[in-house]
Image (cartoon, rainbow, N blue to C red):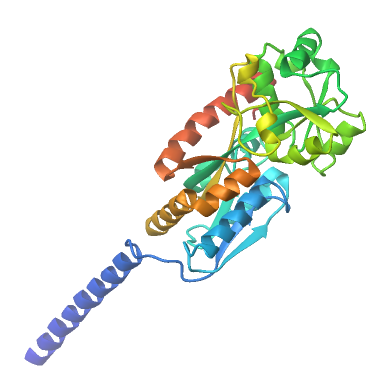
Amino acid sequence: MKKRFFFLVVFALFLVITSACSSNTSSSKGGKDWKPGKTIEIVAPSGAGGGWDTTARMAAKVLGEEKIIDQKMGVVNKTGGGGAVGWAYIHSKKGSSNNLFVTSPPMLLVPLNGQSEFDYKDFTPIANLIADYAAFAVKADSKWNSLNDLFEDMKKDPSSVTVIGGSSPGSMDHIQFVKIAKAAGVDITKIKYVSDQDGGALTSLLNGNADVFSTGVAETAEQVKAGKIKVLGITSEERLKGDIISEFPTAKEQGIDATFINWRGFFGPPNMDKAALNYYEGKLKELSDSPAWADIREKYGWDEEFMDSEEYQKFLEEENKSMKALLDELGLAK
């Protein structure tokens, strides 16, 4: 009987010790010393060459070259649905600490207009990195030389002007134009917006099949330099620095009291481990503060716009309300 009691006591002690060790291991894994144990996959939910892809590839490049992150990183493109295909893929990686993705306003707009079952609340915001801006371009020989010229005509007859962009109706290229036009006094419910998601928007502008091209600042510089288009206005608070783009006037300096920020940052899958979140948040802050990343920002005309996870979450909540209000007015919210 005594032997049996002795073995029971020993077994109980074994369970207690095992449990404590397990707890310590878990605590260590979730602590400040956490590091990724395998290759980090960064998803760009788009094709090559766009804003998501460029941000993902440039971030991975600088993070590696500057030895901010020692682990290998690979960028993967998941195209389709204005980002929805990539988001569905990341959502399937629930709890993973090795899958990240880059996103921007379509993360709000696409779900709001019913084109994705997942929205920003279904993922883990890690940090915002940059602010990019919209540019509204016309052919070089267009009769319009400013946004005010354009909007004066649109106030008289909004549907007489065809606006083209690379995103679907209700997504970024559409909404960035609508926001500025609304501030200028245009009836946004009558704006004629055409979507070309196959990369032909600029060609349509140059061929005369569209009047205004709503796009990103970086996508216009080379065409302006070549003398093919002119930029009537951009959506930043102040003029940007850089060759060519410093010449682009802002909507605000033309008396239109509105801006549009194409924020761009990193998210993780749902239920990302807190230690992993803290790790990536810190590393992205190091990236944002690095001279090498400052060079990348200048090259692409991006502004520094770092937000940590908590700030990012609050920002997204407010942006979501603003975007929903515009979509409601257009009758595009689902």
Q: Residue furthest top?
A: 156
Q: Please name the residue shown 85% across and 25% down the image.
A: 211
Q: Residue at x 64, y 46 (%)?
A: 299
Vertical placement of residue 155 versus 1, above or below: above
Q: Is residue 155 above or below residue 180?
A: above
In the image, what residue occupies the spot 34% across and 62% down?
30
Quarter of the image where the N terminus is located: bottom left
Farthest-out residue, front: 243
In the rendered image, residue 333, in percent from the top left (x then y), is placed at 65, 28
Residue 28 occupies which quadrant of the picture? bottom left
Nearer-the-camera pick, 96 or 36:
36
Quick check: can you spot residue 317? yes
Residue furthest to the bottom in view is 3
Q: Which of the 4 image quarters holds residue 196?
A: top right
Position of residue 3 measured from the top left corner of the image (x, y, whole percent): 10, 92
Residue 290 position, x and y percent, is: 48, 52
Q: Is residue 268 visible?
A: no
In terms of depth relative to the viewer, which is nearer, 238 or 187?
238
